[in-house]
């Protein structure tokens, strides 16, 4: 990875730069599934939501900060728990909610570094499992996740029941 990149926790003062990165992911989703995603109405994200993710303690936003180019990428992490049931033990994991790399910074090890830092963050919180989901159209993201060791755990399927208009 580029030695000018530092992985660190995001700061609330970086709200605009964080939203610009998130808007890049929004664009990818809108292009990939315009039937599901749309441009945000109003602000890209709420300040309070971003600040709560940054503040934790059960979440974090880690950023890849390039010495001269600013934020190259980010990952949003959220600790989750699933209660036990008759056929399954309770478990905790860290969900990789979003991983975003600026297009011009891709293929430079930024995503790998953010994911390594995600693993370290989870382990520092006593959690030894990372989970994520990716839209099936996002084949490059899926290939990346598989290349760093993620394996499919289940498949979520959907069936469109018409045009979605209220009846």
Image: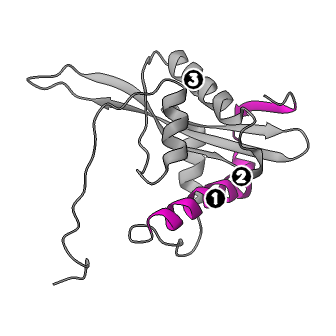
Percent across and percent down for residue 80 are 37, 32
Which residue is under mark 1? 24
Q: Earlier in the sequence, mark 2 or mark 3?
A: 2
Lateral position of residue 93 relative to residue 47, left or right: left
Q: What's the CA distance linking mark 1 and mark 3?
A: 24 Å
Q: What's the CA distance linking mark 2 and mark 3?
A: 25 Å
Examine the image and state in which quarter residue 140 appears: top right
Q: Tell me the residue at 23%/67% (across/down).
A: 160
> Is the C-beta separation of discs 2 and 3 under 8 Å?
no
Q: Tell me the residue at 71%/35% (across/down).
A: 110
Which residue is under mark 3? 121
Percent across and percent down for residue 14 are 74, 50
Residue range in magenta is: 4-33
Q: What's the CA distance linking mark 2 and mark 1?
A: 9 Å
Q: Tell me the residue at 81%/33% (across/down).
A: 5
Magenta-span inclusion, residue 26:
yes
Lateral position of residue 19 relative to residue 28, left or right: right
Foreground: disc 2 or disc 1:
2
- Principal secondary structure, stretch drawn in magenta: helix
> Is the C-beta separation of discs 2 and 1 under 8 Å?
yes
């Amino acid at each position: 990875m580029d030695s000018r990149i530092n992985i660190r926790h995001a700061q609330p003062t970086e709200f605009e730069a964080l939203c610009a990165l998130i808007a890049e992911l929004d664009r990818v989703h809108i292009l990939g599934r315009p039937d599901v995603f749309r441009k945000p109405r109003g602000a890209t994200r709420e300040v309070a939501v971003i600040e709560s993710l940054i503040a934790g303690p059960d979440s974090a936003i880690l950023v890849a900060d390039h010495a001269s180019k600013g934020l190259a990428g980010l990952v949003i992490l959220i600790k989750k728990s699933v209660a036990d049931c008759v056929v399954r033990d309770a478990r905790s994991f860290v969900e990789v909610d979003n991983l975003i790399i600026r297009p011009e910074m891709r293929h430079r090890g930024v995503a790998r570094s953010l994911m390594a830092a995600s693993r370290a963050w989870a382990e520092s919180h006593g959690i030894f499992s990372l989970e994520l989901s990716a839209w099936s159209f996002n084949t490059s993201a899926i290939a990346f996740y598989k290349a760093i060791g993620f394996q499919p755990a289940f498949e979520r399927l959907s069936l469109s029941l018409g045009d979605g208009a209220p009846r």
